[in-house]
Amino acid sequence: MRAPKPQKDPKLRPFRVAAYALYLAVVLGFSSLVIGSVYRSVWAMSPSVPELHGEALPTEACLKRADSLWQELEEKRRTFSDAKNASTLVMGWQAFRVAWLHRLRDAEAQCGAESSERKPLGKVFQKLEQVADLYTTSATQYGGEIAPAVAAYRKAVSQAR
């Protein structure tokens, strides 16, 4: 046989309502701050293509700019193994990536890569951004998994000498 359920004191109802209201206010406030922070971070790391003002650059000049951006991206990727620790690698890559994306977006705008007449050129910039996204994943994985192993190896070599 079950024991009867204890009754809640009606005199304490205003305090229970106030406690629930305070709890909801704190949870909603905290959630809003977290969501706002994530939104601002994503917005800052995902610049949009500015509008084209004037005439678009010739296709050959645009391809040179895309190649220059590719070379810059590739040079930065090659520095992964030079990082002294994982956190500086990931933070450095993220800062580089945002600045690089701004330069990519400027090049896209100046080349009119979003126009329907220049779809092949737009695809070049799209593929370049896709490579940058994959390098970002690689930098994060390298920083989290490989860099500590490389540091341990270097330390072991140093101690062996």
Image (cartoon, helix red, strand yellow):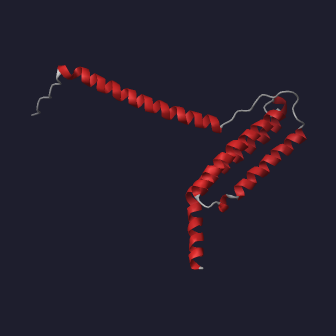
Q: Is residue 140 left or right of residue 124?
A: left
**Relative to residue 129, is residue 90 depicted above or below?**
below
Residue 111 position within the rendered picture, expressed as x and y whole percent measured from the top left = 84, 35
Q: Is residue 99 left or right of residue 53?
A: left
Give the quadrant of the N terminus: top left
Residue 74 position within the rendered picture, expressed as x and y whole percent measured from the top left = 75, 53
Give the quadrant of the C terminus: bottom right
Q: Is residue 25 left or right of residue 111?
A: left
Residue 27 position within the rendered picture, expressed as x and y whole percent measured from the top left = 40, 31
**Relative to residue 71, is residue 159 depicted above or below?**
below
The residue located at (44%, 29%) in the rendering is: 29
Q: Residue furthest bottom?
A: 161
Residue 26 position within the rendered picture, expressed as x and y whole percent measured from the top left = 39, 30
**Relative to residue 134, is residue 54 depicted above or below?**
above
The residue located at (70%, 55%) in the rendering is: 77
Which is nearer the eye, 67 or 159?
A: 159
